[in-house]
Amino acid sequence: MLCGLFTFLCCKGLAKHLEMYKSGCPRFFISRSLDWRVPLYWLMATHIMSLVMQLKLSHARRISNLRCNRIVFFLLFVNILSNGTALLWYHNPRNMFEILAISAISATIEYIIYHILKKFRLNVVYLLFIVMLHLFLCIVDCFLIAHFQKIFGQDAVDIIAETTIEETKSFLSTYLATGKTIAAIVIPITLTYLFWKLSKPIAKSRLAALLIVLLSISGAVVYAQTIYNYAIYRNGMSVPQLHSFTRAGYSLKILKDRERQINQLRLANQNIIATTDISNAPTVIVVIGESFSTYHSSLYGYEKETNPKLSLRLREGSLSVFKDVVTISDHTEGAMCSVFSLNDKGQPFYSAQLYPCIYRAAGYKTTMLDNQYIVGNGITFLTDKKMSDMMFNSRNARGMGLDENLVNYISFGKTPQLIVIHLMGQHYTYSDRYPKNYAHFKAKDYISLPSTQREIVAHYDNSILYNDYVLDQIITKAQDKDCILIYFSDHGEEIYEVDDYMGHGNAANRPDATLQLHVPLMIWTSDTFMDRHSELTNLIKTSVNKAIITDDLPFFLIDIANIQTDCAKLNRSFIREQYSSEPRIVLHSINYEEVKQSSRTAKKY
């Protein structure tokens, strides 16, 4: 009865939410185009929650009569131990309560399974397995926190997938003998033993039994909201993965999905037919930045001079800076899939052709210089060797350290080229992204910020300054060619503009999503290009104020090379009169125009 009432209230509240949204309330986190799906997602989530609550409440009396079973509290403590490491990554204070609630519902479900298996005399084996699994994930998290200041998640799984046997041996010999590693193993094991002892006296409290029931109900609500968010945004990075099992499971799921997508992508890019007039085609350089915040760029109104060299190019008239550009994703992998694929809106990226494959089919020599994705290291379409060979004639075989080292590998031939350069850019840790001689900004230059933030912001601004130098070096190397250079960032970065938070990957749950979604787009043209392609040059210069989404960039790249192919669409090339990006749907469901209207940060610049 209580579960039915709760479901009814949830649906009623959702209906009120939708009514407020349609009447103009600024609820940017849900799209009108998905209104019909929302009630379905909520009904599914609340019915799952109702089932869990029924299971819990059916055992509540039994637990209460026993003054709460010791096993329940022991499992609760173990869950808190393994899930609590997520607080390092998710900085919102409410996550502490959410971890308690999720740990309670998880412990409850684990206890129910334990109680069922008791009839088959498998309960002790099951309990040992669950505790060992929690303990293992906790130790892994503690190890990563001690040595790398991160917790186990998608990026850690990517690194493991990229690591060779020799690298693994070297890694283990370097870290396993350290004091930090020993502490990361001993402390969780010791705490688990203490929890077992502590659970016995606590289990005698009726108040504790009631508390775990209430926490379990709250945990069901949190999990329902998590399922709802994932269904809407389709991005586990945007949903707090506060349970260690959830993080591990999601990461492994992504690896399997990528393998399947790469196989489909290979099929979609076979036997491409594309033509162009190579004798009149320009060399195209595409530079992809990383974690570039327009709110820290002097080209976009930032008070500190972080882009002196590019500002000079802008004044000379060879550089065009686009003001209103948004990325489709707030993390690198999602953004890269978007900006390489000529997929229709709503079509999966892996079912469409990629622009490097089209360039190559049209007669261009294609090259990629990448400081992040190395062929053979990881499971993405940019590290897959077969897919890479379909896109590029040549690629670098290893990372280059600082981004300026990539410039030395740029070379030009007699035939037109497509050169794709993927920088490390401003990816954290920011202090590692520039040489010491570019430490221009100091912590003392940011006296208006809290002392804990000043040095980090200074490092970030220095990385922007260094990125300015790297781009200018690439331009200098290409300035006597018939060349056009396009620079944009995969996503933005949040650097304490709203609260005590820095980073990216969770824009949907942040107060101002523009910080992670608004990105720079700059186009430089050489003198030769401006002379030979004057019409294109004029179209570029007159398009700088258009509302653009980076999902349309591949169509623009096909347009400027005048490549004739089936998937070319002039109405998605942002320099054309018929171009329209509206509505700009980002993170699969968010209407960016609503985000922009509600942004206080955007109005500052």
Image (cartoon, rainbow, N blue to C red):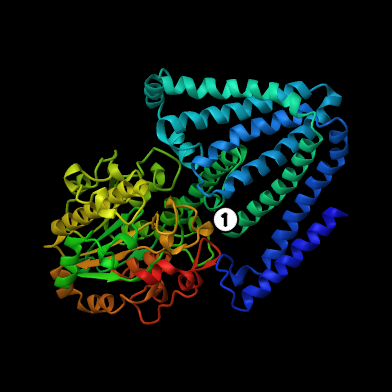
Examine the image and state in which quarter residue 365 appears. bottom left
Q: Mark 1: which secondary structure?
A: loop
Residue depicted at x 50% and y 61%: 511
| Disc 1 packing (10 Å; few <14; some 14–19; many ≥20) | some
Residue depicted at x 16% and y 71%: 315
Name the quarter where the C terminus is drawn.
bottom left
Residue 279 locus on image (x, y percent):
19, 67
Examine the image and state in which quarter residue 194 appears. top right
Residue located farthest toward the top when viewing the structure as drawn = 177
Q: Does 409 appear above or below 130?
A: below
Q: In the displayed structure, does residue 59 sit left or right of residue 404?
A: right
Residue 103 locus on image (x, y percent):
67, 39
Amino acid type, mark 1: Arg
What residue is shown with label 1? 234
Examine the image and state in which quarter residue 75 appears. top right
Residue located farthest toward the left when viewing the structure as drawn = 480
